[in-house]
Image: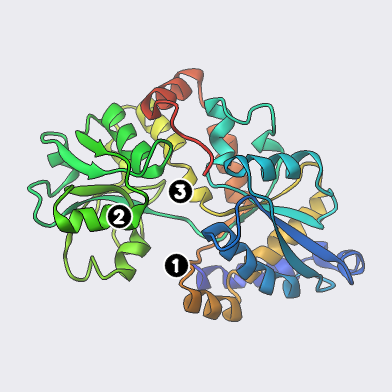
Amino acid sequence: MRNALAGLSWAVAFVASPICGAGAQEFFSGRTITIVVGSSAAGSYDLAARLLARHMGRHIPGAPAIIVRNMPGGGGLTAAAYLYHRAARDGTEIGALSRTLPILPLFGEGRDLFDPLKFGWIGSTVNVVGAAVSWRSSPVKTIYDVMQRELIIGGTGPGSQANVYPSAMNHILGARFRIVSGYPGSAEVIMAMERGEVEGFGSWSWSAMEKGGYLKAQKLNVLVQLGLKKHPDHMDVPLVLDLATSKMDRDALELIFAPQTFARPIAAPPGIPIATLETLRAAFAASLVDPELLEEADRLKIEIELVSGVELERLIQRLYSASSDVIQRASQAVGGALKAD
């Protein structure tokens, strides 16, 4: 629940602001808000959206009911296109989008379907910080070792973070990850490490490593953190952005690793009234420090860390101001493999 309580006073003050007054209460009273989820039921996006749906309504003036509607297809592109073109623009339909969707148009995918700059970004329920690791028996102990010696790691297929992220580090930082692709998922890669089939894993979340007991048992060498900022509990491990040797390379890495901050983004359609968007942002922020939501999240093992809508909006604006050279550098580094997830 990193940083959740730190935002409590801000969220409470925001909820009490004038934009959340009588007009919003009159509008939302007796209504239903639908969260359109761009994936099937029981996945991580769906579980987080349903958790939010059970708690966010009481933080919105008028206490509307909130339901979830799954709209899988196209790796999340179907839901994004629906939200952009067809959803109601009055606050009664919002979307739980794929973490990669905000940057896909920069890489040529989804460009004709939506413009991420025009969505009303409400926030994300978590900021993901991942890591590339080697098994404890590997002679590769640090990211600097990977610059000198090949590390065989498990991959889960083209377009997956387990493949894209180490490939990007190879191209931009000169790392020497050799990806053995084709494992069905992260669980199979982990088992392959334990059996000695591969030496490491190119993208594993801190929370998963901690919950699995791998860090406490000292079974891993954590090489580099994957995200836009370090995990606050692991400040000693290098951040991938800090390894760049030029501004262009750092900017390209920021483009590639931005989905870690988007993580589980919630957005409103373009054209939603500003006051309504601010009401939803305030309710979202208040929900993520609500003790009842946090207690349920702990029980369900869903990590919660507020990323505000303003933060997402500013990040997207910064990414879309990148030069064509930076975008080309990032695109070449991922080999066109970054896709909706």
Question: What's the amino acid at mark 1?
Answer: Arg
Question: What's the amino acid at mark 2?
Answer: Glu
Residue 321 visible in rendering:
no
- Mark identifier at residue 188: 2
Q: Nearer the viewer, mark 2 or mark 1?
A: 2
Tell me which numbered mark, 2 or 1, is placed earlier along the sequence. Answer: 1
The answer for how far apart the CA atoms under marks 3 and 2 are is 22 Å
Question: What's the amino acid at mark 3?
Answer: Gln
Q: Cβ–Cβ below 8 Å for labels 3 and 2?
A: no
Q: Which residue sits at x=44%, y=67%?
A: 2
Q: Residues within 10 Å of mark 2 (few under 14, many from 20)?
A: some
Up the image or down, 136 lies above or below 316; here it is below
The answer for how far apart the CA atoms under marks 2 and 1 are is 28 Å
The residue pinned by badge 1 equals 2
- In depth, the one of 283 and 139 nearer the eye is 139
Image position, residue 246 (x, y; %): 32, 27
- Mark identifier at residue 260: 3
Secondary structure, mark 3, is: helix
Q: Nearer the viewer, mark 3 or mark 2?
A: 2
